[in-house]
Amino acid sequence: MKACLLIPNYDHGDEIVAVAKSLDRHGLECIVVDDGSGERTRGILDRLSREYPWLSVHTRERNGGRGAALRTGYRVAGRRGFSHTIQLDADGQHDSNDIPRFLEEIAIDPDALVLGAPIFDASAPRSRLYGRQLSRLMVWIATRSFDIVDPLCGFRAIPLKAALELMDAVELGDHMEFDPELLIHLHRRGVPVRSVPTRVIYATAGLSHFDPVRDNVRMTRLYTRSLLQALGVVSERPRRRSASDGGKPR
C-alpha cells in the first residue's frame, strides 16, 4: 500500500497555504492539481512546491471543473505508483489531523473506499445541509443501501485501481456531480465502503465554486440517471475515446 494526498485547486491561493502547512507533519507526498487558476494562485503554488519538497503541482491550463481535476489527479497518482489517494479540499474545510485515521482504515481494507462522514458546526449553511440530506437519500436509493453515509464530503480515500478501471470504462461528470457519481458506480461494482467521522468547517468568507443553479441541475440529472440505471431503464454511459484528463506537471 502506498498512499498520497491529493488536492484539487482552483484559485484557493490564500487558503491552500494554511492547508499545506497543516500537512507538513504527515510525511506523505501531496499532488495538487491546479485547475486553471490565475497567475497569483499559480505563483503561490510555485512557492509552496519549493518550500515543501513533498508537494508537487500538476497544472491544467484551462479550468475544467472539480471532476475533471480529480480524474487528472487519479491518473497522475496512478502513474507515480500510488495505490490510494487521500483527497481533501484546498479551502481548509477539512481537518488534516484525521489523515492517520484514513490511513488506518486503508490498512484494514485496502480495497475499500474510505469516506469522510462530516460533523458540522454552526458555520454550515442550512441550505447546504438540506441539500446534503437530499443527496444522501438519492444515493441510498440508487445504490439500494445505506453504506454511503455522505456522498458529498471531499475528504475521502480512493483505491486507485478500482477508480482508474471505472474511469476507463464509464463517462463521468466534470463538475461537482463527480463526487457522488464516482461513489455510486464504485459501490455498484462491489467496492466496499468504510467511514471516518471528521469535522468540517465552512469559512464565513471562504471562496466557494459551487454554482447553485448549474451544479444543482447537474446533480438532478445525475440522480435521475442513476435511479433509471438502478431500475434497468438506461445503461451506463461508455467513456468517449476523445475524453481527456490532461494537464502538465510544474
Image (spheres, rainbow, N blue to C red):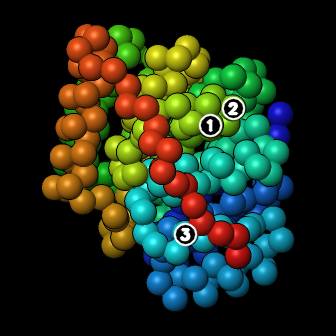
Where is residue 110 drawn, in percent x and y?
74, 25
Which residue is the site of mark 1?
A: 164
Give amino acid for label 1: Leu
The label shown at residue 241 is none
> Is the C-beta separation of discs 1 and 2 under 8 Å?
yes
Element assignment for label 3? strand
- What residue lies at 73% left-to-right and 45% top-to-bottom? 78
| Crowdedness near tag 3: few (<14), some (14–19) or many (≥20) residues, C-alpha within 10 Å | many
Residue nearest the viewer, comparing 97 with 50: 50
Q: CA distance from mark 2 to mark 3?
A: 23 Å
- Residue 180, horizontal then vertical, whole percent: 39, 35
**Which quadrant holds residue 172?**
top left
Residue 218 spot, x, y in % from top left? 24, 45
Name the residue rendered at 18%, 46% in the picture.
217
- Residue type, numbered disc 3: Arg
Count of residue discs: 3
Residue 234 vs 88, above or below: the answer is above
* Residue assigned mark 2: 161
Looking at this view, is 200 or 231 the one in front? 231
Image quadrant containing the C terminus: bottom right
Looking at the image, tell me whether mark 2 or mark 3 is earlier in sequence order. 3
Could you tell me the amino acid type at mark 2?
Answer: Lys
The alpha-carbon separation of the residues under discs 1 and 2 comes to: 5 Å
On the picture, is 89 further left or further right than 112? Answer: left
User: First in sequence: mark 3 or mark 1?
Assistant: 3
Residue annotated with mark 3: 60
Res. 159 in view:
no
Residue drawn at point x = 43 percent, y = 32 percent = 238
